[in-house]
Amino acid sequence: MTDPVAGGSPTQMRETFSAFYLREFPRLVALTAAVGGNRAIAEDLAQEAMLRAHRHWDRIAAYDKPGAWARRVAINLATSALRRRTAEARRAVRLGHASGTIPPPDPGDHEVWAAVRALPARQRAAIALHYLEDRPVKEIAAILECTESTAKAHLHKGRAALVAALADERGRP
Protein backbone atom coordinates (compact mmCIF):
# COMPACT_ATOMS: atom_id res chain seq x y z
CA MET A 1 0.00 0.00 0.00
CA THR A 2 3.00 2.32 0.40
CA ASP A 3 6.30 2.61 -1.32
CA PRO A 4 9.61 3.80 0.05
CA VAL A 5 10.39 7.43 -0.56
CA ALA A 6 12.84 7.76 -3.41
CA GLY A 7 16.31 7.92 -2.00
CA GLY A 8 15.05 7.49 1.56
CA SER A 9 15.46 4.62 3.98
CA PRO A 10 13.05 1.67 3.89
CA THR A 11 11.53 2.90 7.16
CA GLN A 12 10.31 6.06 5.42
CA MET A 13 7.09 5.06 3.73
CA ARG A 14 4.82 7.11 1.51
CA GLU A 15 1.21 6.39 0.69
CA THR A 16 0.40 5.34 -2.85
CA PHE A 17 -1.98 7.43 -4.90
CA SER A 18 -4.40 4.49 -5.09
CA ALA A 19 -4.69 4.29 -1.31
CA PHE A 20 -5.07 8.07 -1.09
CA TYR A 21 -7.77 8.02 -3.75
CA LEU A 22 -9.76 5.24 -2.10
CA ARG A 23 -9.69 7.01 1.25
CA GLU A 24 -10.26 10.59 0.14
CA PHE A 25 -12.54 10.44 -2.90
CA PRO A 26 -15.82 9.75 -1.03
CA ARG A 27 -14.98 12.52 1.44
CA LEU A 28 -14.29 14.97 -1.38
CA VAL A 29 -17.60 14.12 -3.03
CA ALA A 30 -19.50 14.80 0.21
CA LEU A 31 -17.60 18.04 0.79
CA THR A 32 -18.10 19.40 -2.72
CA ALA A 33 -21.79 18.42 -2.63
CA ALA A 34 -22.19 20.41 0.59
CA VAL A 35 -20.33 23.41 -0.78
CA GLY A 36 -21.67 23.28 -4.33
CA GLY A 37 -25.15 21.86 -3.84
CA ASN A 38 -25.31 19.04 -6.36
CA ARG A 39 -24.10 15.48 -5.89
CA ALA A 40 -23.62 14.66 -9.59
CA ILE A 41 -21.52 17.76 -10.14
CA ALA A 42 -19.73 17.08 -6.85
CA GLU A 43 -18.52 13.73 -8.17
CA ASP A 44 -17.06 15.43 -11.24
CA LEU A 45 -15.40 18.11 -9.11
CA ALA A 46 -13.95 15.56 -6.71
CA GLN A 47 -12.65 13.60 -9.69
CA GLU A 48 -11.04 16.77 -11.07
CA ALA A 49 -9.38 17.46 -7.71
CA MET A 50 -8.05 13.88 -7.68
CA LEU A 51 -6.80 14.22 -11.25
CA ARG A 52 -4.85 17.31 -10.24
CA ALA A 53 -3.47 15.47 -7.22
CA HIS A 54 -2.41 12.56 -9.43
CA ARG A 55 -0.59 14.87 -11.85
CA HIS A 56 1.53 16.23 -8.99
CA TRP A 57 1.55 13.17 -6.74
CA ASP A 58 5.32 13.09 -6.28
CA ARG A 59 5.17 16.53 -4.66
CA ILE A 60 1.78 16.18 -2.89
CA ALA A 61 2.59 12.79 -1.36
CA ALA A 62 5.43 14.42 0.53
CA TYR A 63 3.05 16.87 2.26
CA ASP A 64 2.15 16.21 5.88
CA LYS A 65 -1.54 16.26 4.91
CA PRO A 66 -2.10 15.66 1.20
CA GLY A 67 -5.85 15.41 1.92
CA ALA A 68 -5.86 19.07 2.97
CA TRP A 69 -4.41 20.02 -0.40
CA ALA A 70 -7.10 18.01 -2.19
CA ARG A 71 -9.85 19.58 -0.07
CA ARG A 72 -8.62 23.09 -0.85
CA VAL A 73 -8.64 22.29 -4.57
CA ALA A 74 -12.11 20.68 -4.34
CA ILE A 75 -13.55 23.64 -2.40
CA ASN A 76 -12.15 26.08 -4.97
CA LEU A 77 -13.60 24.01 -7.81
CA ALA A 78 -17.01 23.76 -6.10
CA THR A 79 -17.11 27.49 -5.41
CA SER A 80 -16.25 28.27 -9.03
CA ALA A 81 -18.83 25.80 -10.34
CA LEU A 82 -21.56 27.26 -8.12
CA ARG A 83 -20.66 30.75 -9.28
CA ARG A 84 -20.84 29.62 -12.92
CA ARG A 85 -24.22 27.89 -12.45
CA THR A 86 -25.64 30.94 -10.70
CA ALA A 87 -24.43 33.24 -13.49
CA GLU A 88 -25.87 30.88 -16.12
CA ALA A 89 -29.24 30.86 -14.34
CA ARG A 90 -29.27 34.67 -14.21
CA ARG A 91 -28.46 34.87 -17.92
CA ALA A 92 -31.21 32.37 -18.72
CA VAL A 93 -33.75 34.39 -16.75
CA ARG A 94 -32.59 37.62 -18.40
CA LEU A 95 -32.92 36.02 -21.83
CA GLY A 96 -36.35 34.64 -20.99
CA HIS A 97 -35.38 30.95 -20.94
CA ALA A 98 -36.67 28.47 -18.41
CA SER A 99 -34.89 28.85 -15.09
CA GLY A 100 -34.33 25.11 -14.73
CA THR A 101 -30.62 25.29 -15.50
CA ILE A 102 -29.62 24.68 -11.88
CA PRO A 103 -30.31 21.06 -10.93
CA PRO A 104 -32.27 20.51 -7.71
CA PRO A 105 -30.17 19.91 -4.58
CA ASP A 106 -29.77 16.50 -3.06
CA PRO A 107 -32.50 15.38 -0.65
CA GLY A 108 -31.81 15.25 3.08
CA ASP A 109 -31.31 18.35 5.19
CA HIS A 110 -32.28 20.40 2.16
CA GLU A 111 -33.25 23.44 4.21
CA VAL A 112 -30.01 23.51 6.17
CA TRP A 113 -27.66 22.95 3.24
CA ALA A 114 -29.58 25.44 1.09
CA ALA A 115 -28.90 28.00 3.83
CA VAL A 116 -25.23 26.93 3.93
CA ARG A 117 -24.92 27.42 0.17
CA ALA A 118 -26.22 30.99 0.58
CA LEU A 119 -23.25 31.86 2.82
CA PRO A 120 -20.10 33.53 1.49
CA ALA A 121 -17.62 30.99 0.09
CA ARG A 122 -15.16 30.91 3.02
CA GLN A 123 -17.95 30.58 5.62
CA ARG A 124 -19.61 27.88 3.51
CA ALA A 125 -16.35 25.93 3.25
CA ALA A 126 -15.60 26.28 6.98
CA ILE A 127 -19.11 25.08 7.94
CA ALA A 128 -18.92 22.11 5.56
CA LEU A 129 -15.46 21.09 6.75
CA HIS A 130 -16.46 21.37 10.41
CA TYR A 131 -19.88 19.76 10.36
CA LEU A 132 -19.64 17.40 7.41
CA GLU A 133 -16.09 16.18 7.96
CA ASP A 134 -15.80 16.89 11.70
CA ARG A 135 -12.57 18.84 11.16
CA PRO A 136 -11.07 20.83 14.04
CA VAL A 137 -10.43 24.55 13.60
CA LYS A 138 -6.69 23.98 13.16
CA GLU A 139 -7.26 21.73 10.12
CA ILE A 140 -9.89 24.07 8.68
CA ALA A 141 -7.37 26.90 8.92
CA ALA A 142 -4.74 24.80 7.13
CA ILE A 143 -7.14 23.78 4.36
CA LEU A 144 -8.42 27.33 3.83
CA GLU A 145 -4.87 28.72 4.18
CA CYS A 146 -5.78 31.19 6.91
CA THR A 147 -5.04 31.66 10.60
CA GLU A 148 -6.93 29.70 13.24
CA SER A 149 -8.59 32.89 14.46
CA THR A 150 -9.80 33.63 10.92
CA ALA A 151 -11.16 30.07 10.61
CA LYS A 152 -12.96 30.55 13.94
CA ALA A 153 -14.39 33.83 12.66
CA HIS A 154 -15.65 32.11 9.48
CA LEU A 155 -17.34 29.43 11.59
CA HIS A 156 -18.82 31.97 14.01
CA LYS A 157 -20.17 34.24 11.27
CA GLY A 158 -21.44 31.24 9.28
CA ARG A 159 -23.27 29.82 12.30
CA ALA A 160 -24.81 33.19 13.13
CA ALA A 161 -25.97 33.65 9.54
CA LEU A 162 -27.43 30.12 9.50
CA VAL A 163 -29.35 30.72 12.73
CA ALA A 164 -30.80 33.93 11.29
CA ALA A 165 -31.60 32.40 7.90
CA LEU A 166 -33.23 29.28 9.33
CA ALA A 167 -35.20 31.31 11.88
CA ASP A 168 -36.45 33.63 9.09
CA GLU A 169 -37.44 30.63 6.97
CA ARG A 170 -39.47 29.18 9.81
CA GLY A 171 -41.05 32.53 10.62
CA ARG A 172 -39.41 32.87 14.03
CA PRO A 173 -37.87 36.09 15.36
Image (spheres, rainbow, N blue to C red):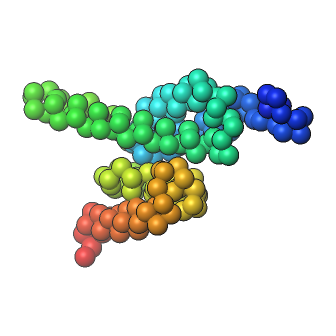
Residue drawn at 39 percent across, 56 percent down? 123
**Vertical comparison of 173 with 31: above or below:** below
Q: How many marks?
A: 0
Quarter of the figure with residue 98: top left
Quadrant where the N terminus sits is top right
- Residue farthest to the bottom, as pictured: 173
On the rendered image, what quadrant is the C terminus found in? bottom left
User: Which x, y percent locates residue 170?
Assistant: 29, 66
Asked whether residue 58 appears in the rendered view, the answer is yes
Please state the horizontal and vertical placement of residue 32, each as a whole percent of the image. Answer: 47, 41
Residue 15 is left or right of residue 161, and the answer is right
Image coordinates for residue 69, horizontal then vertical, percent: 56, 41
Give me the residue at 71% from left, 28% from top.
18
Residue at x 77%, y 36% (from the top left corner) = 14
Which is more toward the observer, 165 or 120?
120
Where residue 77 appears, x then y in whole percent?
A: 42, 35
